[in-house]
Image (tube, rainbow, N blue to C red):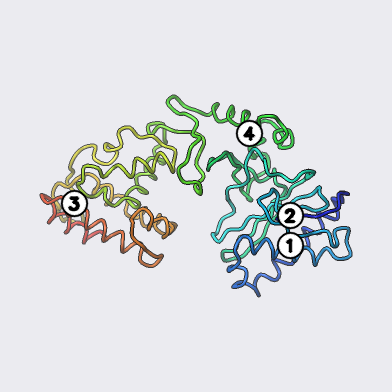
Amino acid sequence: MIISNNSEPHITEFHHLLYLTLSELQSSAPKNIVKLQQLTAQKFETHLKELMTELAQNTVFENSIELVSGQRFPDIVAKQYYGIEVKTTIKNHWKTTGNSVFEGTRVDGVERIFMFFAKLADPIEFRCRPYEDVLSEVVVTHSPRYLIDMNLAQGQTIFDKINMPYDQLRISSNPILPIKDYYRSKLRDGDELWWMDADQDKANNLILRMWNNLSKDEKQLYQLKAMIYFPELFGKQSDKFGKLAMWLVQQESIVCPNIRDQFTAGGRIEIHINNQSFGELPRIFSHLNNNLHLIQELFKESDPSLLSHYWNEPTTEMSKYELWTNKVVYFSQQHHEYSENIVRFLKVIL
């Protein structure tokens, strides 16, 4: 936590200080790639504070910025009026989960807040925008939080969607009510608001959706992810859909009452590849054959640590696809009546 002591606002000077800070960080980044990428979020906050202190010399903010411990919002406060919330990521995107909608830890007296975002993936970039201009949605970890999107277009904030300015919402007695009303207005028959999440690091949609309400493309995407995350689906265990069903609810906020049918509907199907016949195989192998190119594309974006979690086995960026193919072969051999044809089939496509 970084806090300043003087309360007189100087908006033009503060904008200039932010501009100088961004310019200095961006211009020096190519010479400090390793150093920057090794910084934790807390250490980057300290680095930013030290840089702002240096750049604030001979300005109205000189000697006014200090580091304070504790979980407060925002991370940097200048003259007890302007604030900066600091976010970092080591991934190549501009989205993250932000502060609580309720803002219970907001520093007293702070009226104008800016979002300072450091993208420490190659190429390293820094951006700073008014806080309320980058809040696109509300998502749920252990409490409703804003979703930050540094690429958000004008007129697309959550405050535009609920037709209420940020400053009006944040001082209301129950700021979550207008947000709930907005998301309720988007519900389809059978959908409900989703307020719980077992994984507090994963941001979930507020709406709990039914599988049948998904678009065709959404259904296909979740089917492909399921085949990646849960290779046991290629096996024959009676409980092979359990982890998938739990994942859909907890991580994707989707209820699928007939989950087995999404992979087994139609029973077996005759598979032919390049004039080779593999006989009748369970339908999931037809899904694999028809969508392998899409699965391979999804693998490029998949997080090895996430795969390790779902597979209960460590993997790396280099080994993740090979490990998955080995698991598919392993589980597929549980179909003893088709095992010979399945092995031939997998050798051809994998």
**In this rendering, the label closer to the viewer, 2 or 4:** 2
Residue drawn at the location 62% of the way across and 68% of the way down = 36
Q: In 3D space, how far apart are the residues under numbered discs 2 and 4 (Cα atoms)?
A: 28 Å
Instruction: Identify the residue under disc 2.
Output: 76
Instruction: Identify the residue under disc 1.
Output: 49
Q: Residues within 10 Å of mark 2 (few under 14, many from 20)?
A: many
**In this rendering, the label closer to the viewer, 1 or 3:** 1
Instruction: Identify the residue under disc 3.
Output: 272
Three-letter amino acid code at disc 2? Answer: Ile
Q: Residue 305 lies in what quarter of the image? A: bottom left
Q: Secondary structure at mark 4?
A: helix
Work out whether 202 lies above or below 92.
above
The image position of residue 31, as x and y in percent, is 66, 75
Q: Residue furthest left?
A: 337
Residue drawn at the location 17% of the way across and 42% of the way down = 268
Labels 1 and 2 touching (C-beta < 8 A): yes
| Residue 161: numbered disc | 4
Of pointers 4 and 3, the one earlier in the residue sequence: 4
Work out whether 277 lies above or below 123.
above
Three-letter amino acid code at disc 1? Answer: Lys
Three-letter amino acid code at disc 4? Answer: Lys
Q: Secondary structure at mark 1?
A: helix
Three-letter amino acid code at disc 3? Answer: His
Q: Residue furthest bottom?
A: 31
Q: Residue 41 lies in what quarter of the image? A: bottom right
Of pointers 2 and 3, the one earlier in the residue sequence: 2
